[in-house]
Image (cartoon, rainbow, N blue to C red):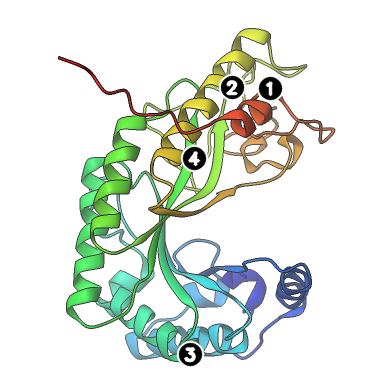
Amino acid sequence: MKCEVIHPEWDKYNFTLADKFVEYGKKNDMFVIGHTLIWHSQLSPFVHKIKSSDSLLQFFTNHINTVAGRYAGKVNGWDVVNEALNEDGTMRKSIFLEKLGEDYIVKAFQLAQKAAPNTELYYNDYNIEQPKKRAGVIAIIKKLQAAGVRIDGVGIQGHWRAGKVPLKDIEESIIEYAALGMKVMITELDLGVLPNPWDGDAADVNLIAEYTAKMNPYPSGLPDSMQVKLTKSYEDLFSLFLKYKDKISRITFWGVNDGQSWLNGWPIRGRTNYPLLFDREFKPKPAFFKVIETKTKPEVKKAF
């Protein structure tokens, strides 16, 4: 449902795959998420050639009205705006910010609300459990609410790394977003096991790095030591999720088995990653069983 697929030319839409996706979800009684209406990345080439603000606004409006409107009553939730923030919580310098101004997010949610009135509307982004970026999301939520525009939830993209999951930041974010009336969702969940070529944990699809053997340490299989670390990270993460199960509406994995993961090709092509609960043969990994076994831990009351 990304622009480059579903809206390849100014006056041309391609609904073939999206229709099949939605039909499959409805046939199997699934909760269908549309991803995504407005995103600076994976835009169709023609969008980048738009020169005037008026023309971009026309594209913006037609795109949301047409796509969200087509699936009104069929798609249960939309990622209305995706990845609009920098790491410090400021607005990303996208074509939308440049030509439409900071209120483009409000406009996107207004249009989506009108085109699909019974569909949940979300803001989705990575690293928004981090304090500075979290503050940026909170500002967006408050701005929408002040304008009387509906936003139903926030998707925290779970692109974390085994052994380095920021549990404290995640917990604080769940609490703060829920306090604003948001449904909290963990989206795009995967725990990478490979080294990151940069110091940070960005998930910007436009970032790339060169291949070296050092950056692909497990081409033939995951060693037991790293398997243990992956399993423990998933156990700790789901223990936290269960603690706040009243605030978290869904958890979505970014892929089913390791072989399908985008992390095999990002940010370095040709690597072998192991971030999910099922291996390349669809066999459940130790982390899968630990997630299934995870229970909410009873609160220990101290006697004094």
Closest to the camera, between mark 3 and mark 1, is: 1
Say few, some or many: other residues with alpha carbon within 10 Å of mark 3 (under 14 / 14 to 19 / 20 or more). Answer: some
Mark pair 1, 4: CA separation: 20 Å
Question: Considering the numbered disc 1 on the image, is that residue within a helix, a strand or a loop?
Answer: helix
> Which sits earlier in the primary sequence, circle 1 or circle 4?
4
Mark pair 1, 2: CA separation: 6 Å
The amino acid type found where label 1 is placed reads Pro
Residue in view at x 50 percent, y 76 percent: 47
- Judging by the rendered image, the residue that carries numbered circle 2 is 231
Question: Considering the numbered disc 4 on the image, is that residue within a helix, a strand or a loop?
Answer: strand
> Which sits earlier in the primary sequence, circle 2 or circle 4?
4
> Which sits earlier in the primary sequence, circle 3 or circle 1?
3
Mark pair 3, 4: CA separation: 31 Å
Residue 212 place in picture, x, y as percent: 61, 20
- Judging by the rendered image, the residue that carries numbered circle 3 is 115
Q: Residue furthest right?
A: 281
> Which label is found at residue 159?
4
Say few, some or many: other residues with alpha carbon within 10 Å of mark 4 (under 14 / 14 to 19 / 20 or more). Answer: many
Question: Which image quarter is the C terminus in?
Answer: top left
In the rendered image of this protein, does residue 22 appear above or below residue 107? Answer: above
Residue situated in front as seen by the camera: 121 or 300: 300
- Judging by the rendered image, the residue that carries numbered circle 1 is 286
Q: Is residue 234 left or right of residue 284?
A: left
Residue in view at x 74 percent, y 78 percent: 19
Closest to the camera, between mark 1 and mark 4, is: 1
> Which sits earlier in the primary sequence, circle 1 or circle 2?
2
CB contact under 8 Å: marks 2 and 3: no
In the rendered image of this protein, does residue 131 appear above or below residue 22? Answer: above
Say few, some or many: other residues with alpha carbon within 10 Å of mark 2 (under 14 / 14 to 19 / 20 or more). Answer: many
Mark pair 2, 3: CA separation: 42 Å
Say few, some or many: other residues with alpha carbon within 10 Å of mark 1 (under 14 / 14 to 19 / 20 or more). Answer: some
